Amino acid sequence: CMGCHAVDKKLVGPSYKDVAAKHKGQSGAVEKVAARIQSGGSGMYGPIPMPAQPNLKPDELKLLAQWILAGAPDK
């Protein structure tokens, strides 16, 4: 993930803070972000595709999505 994303600046993909801001206040945001991580895709933040992560378990996807939506805090 960190090869393409940074906490507070765009690299290949959007920053985690930008992802958190885009989904702020949306119901089901954790599930949406977790599904996007699992399936990958492109178009939401530009034309460069994000590879799918199909080997992550549901609890890992949820934890990662929660962390991203919290703005990727250090702790």
Image (spheres, helix red, strand yellow):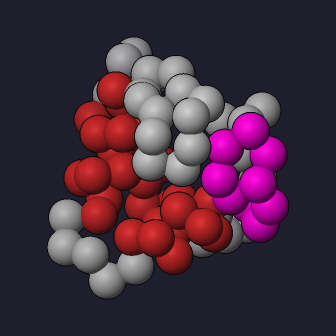
For the magenta stretch, what is the residue range? Answer: 7-15
In the image, 61 versus 44, the foreground residue is 44
Q: Quadrant of residue 53?
A: top left
Q: Is residue 1 above or below residue 63?
A: above
Q: Is residue 64 magenta?
A: no
**Secondary structure, magenta segment, majority class:** loop
Can I make out residue 72 in this image? yes
Q: Quadrant of residue 4?
A: top right
Q: Residue at x 36, y 39 (%)?
A: 36
Residue lying furthest left: 27
Q: Quadrant of residue 16?
A: bottom right
Q: x and y percent of residue 44 in the render?
A: 44, 48
- Whether residue 14 sits left or right of residue 45 in the image: it is right
Q: Is residue 20 above or below residue 37?
A: below
Can I make out residue 62 in this image? no
Residue lying furthest bottom: 25
Q: Residue at x 74, y 38 (%)?
A: 12
Quarter of the figure that contains the N terminus: top right
